[in-house]
Image (cartoon, rainbow, N blue to C red):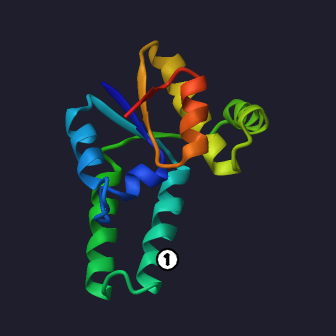
Amino acid sequence: MFLYLDTSSLVKLYVEEDESSIITALVRDSEVTATSIIAYAEARAAFARRFHEKAFTLAEHSRIKRAFDKDWSNYLILNVTGDMIRLAGDLAEKHYLRGFDSIHLASALTLRQELSAPITFSCFDDNLSKAAVVEKLGQD
């Protein structure tokens, strides 16, 4: 299985939430786990926000960042291209998506095209999830 994680799913690998075990199992069962390069900044922002909300200690925040940085090279990182950005713009208009959500969807669609294989798309945003279904990406 080829798995694409948007940032909401990726964060669940490092911050314990209700659905964390689902994402951990998906990653364990995937042949390749991919995400967009933008997920790095988004995830770090999510970790920082949670830290500032006092969801975890400084030591836990440091451990999360170290684990994330260590794992980052294990993911297939999709660079954002001009064609991908144009596709993301079209997808944002078609599905009423936020900018980074449309880039995640465009990244997964680009990966599917490049691999000529089905992609399981994992996210925890209802609108993005619906758009992925319309675009015929498999859901977790």
Q: How many marks?
A: 1
Q: Quadrant of the N terminus?
A: top left
Q: Secondary structure at mark 1?
A: helix
Find residue 132 and report its image quarter.
top right
Give how far across and how far down residue 131 sits, in percent: 61, 33
Q: Residues within 10 Å of mark 1 (few under 14, many from 20)?
A: few
Residue drawn where x is 53% and y is 38% of the image: 129
Q: Quadrant of the C terminus?
A: top left
Residue 106 lies, in percent from the top left, at 61, 33
Q: Is residue 104 visible?
A: no
Give the residue drawn at x 39%, y 52%. 10
Quadrant of res 15? bottom left
Q: Position of residue 73 (x, y in %)?
A: 33, 48
- The answer to which of 127 and 117 lies nearer the viewer is 127
Report the side of 89 relative to 137 (left or right).
Answer: right
Residue highlighted by disc 1: 49
Locate residue 64, reporting x and y percent: 30, 70
Above or below, 111 relative to 89: above
Instruction: Give the quarter of the image for residue 25.
Output: top left
Residue found at the very far top of the displayed protein? 116
Q: In the image shown, does 80 or 123 lie closer to the viewer?
A: 123
* Amino acid marked by disc 1: Arg
Residue in the image at 50% along x and 24% along y: 137
On the picture, is 21 further left or further right than 122?
left
Residue 36 visible in the picture = yes
